[in-house]
Image: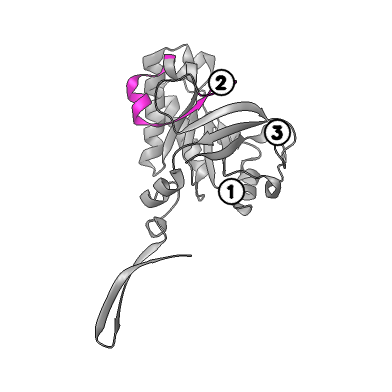
Amino acid sequence: MTKKGIDVSEWQGDINWFEVDKDFVIIRAGYGRELSQKDKKFERNYSGAKGAGIPCGAYWYSYAMSEDEARSEAKVFLEVLKGKQFEYPVYLDVEEQKVLSLGREKVSAIISVFLKEMENAGYFSGLYMSAYQLTNYTNEYIKKRFAVWVANYDVSKPNYSGSYGMWQSSSKGSISGISGNVDIDECYVDYPKIIKEAGDNGFSNDEKNDKVSVTINIDGRTFSGMLEEQ
């Protein structure tokens, strides 16, 4: 299963979502530790994509230099996501050189704290990094524990030996509905099914799946089975 998608932020301006022909979109929610750093187009992009029937995920660009700062960033991310539903994971974007300069173990600790905060709040969380950064700045626990969205351009497949569910293959895509360049992604995991069945990312237990068990009695005979919404 391969789904074709994009990721967007305020830098794409006002998107005509009804012209966007993609399977999913990952939307930047913001960056840093302050609510004022919410992406200026997040609400518009979320409502536009949902209105056009495009499944969504979200990401938060991190500047966290410590575990405490990671917790603060996660808290703001959660505030921005409140009341919304995401069929795809919510990702932590780690690529600031100042953060990476802390080294593999400190960077991994920051990532782990942030993503566990998101998980504890009921979100299916993942990590976005380049193939090089994943290889050199995260430990094996991070690589195996969390969903990975890897960035690697101008290659036939990512130069990354670990497992990954999504690949950002280009930053220079051109699609209808968006002026200028846009990031292009591929997804290989059925995240909507996983997330809805788990009741994560704003989906309630009643929305875990679209099947219900039914038992009826007709002329003294009992019939039971599963009904699926069409």
Membership of 43 in magenta stretch: no
Residue 13 horizontal/vertical position (percent): 72, 37
Mark 2 → mark 1, Cα distance in angstroms: 27 Å
Tell which of 133 and 115 is nearer to you: 133
Q: Which residue is mark 3?
A: 174
Membership of 143 in magenta stretch: yes
Q: Give me the residue at 74% from left, 31% from top.
A: 180
Front disc: 2 or 3? 2
User: Which kind of residue does numbered mark 2 sit on?
Assistant: Val
Above/below status of 92 relative to 80? above
Span highlighted in magenta in the image = 136-157
Front disc: 3 or 1? 3
Above/below status of 97 relative to 170? above
User: Which kind of residue does numbered mark 3 sit on?
Assistant: Ser
| Sequence order check, earlier mark of 3 and 1 | 1
Residue 71 horizontal/vertical position (percent): 42, 30
Q: Give residue 155's mark.
A: 2
Instruction: Using residue 122 as the reference point, say whether residue 43 is left or right of it.
Output: right
Residue ranking furthest to the bottom = 219
Q: Give me the residue at 36% from left, 65% from top.
A: 212
Front disc: 2 or 1? 2
Q: Give me the residue at 56% from left, 20% from top.
A: 155
Q: Count neighbours of disc 3 (C-alpha within 10 A) and say few if under 14, some if 14 to 19, many if 20 or more.
A: few
Q: In terms of secondary structure, where does tag 3 sit?
A: loop
The number of numbered discs placed on residues in the rendered structure image is 3
Instruction: Using residue 37 as the reference point, say whether residue 75 is left or right of it.
Output: left
| Sequence order check, earlier mark of 2 and 3 | 2
Q: Count neighbours of disc 2 (C-alpha within 10 A) and say few if under 14, some if 14 to 19, many if 20 or more.
A: few
Q: Image quarter for residue 70?
A: top left
Q: Give residue 188's mark.
A: none
Q: Which residue is mark 1?
A: 54
| Sequence order check, earlier mark of 2 and 1 | 1
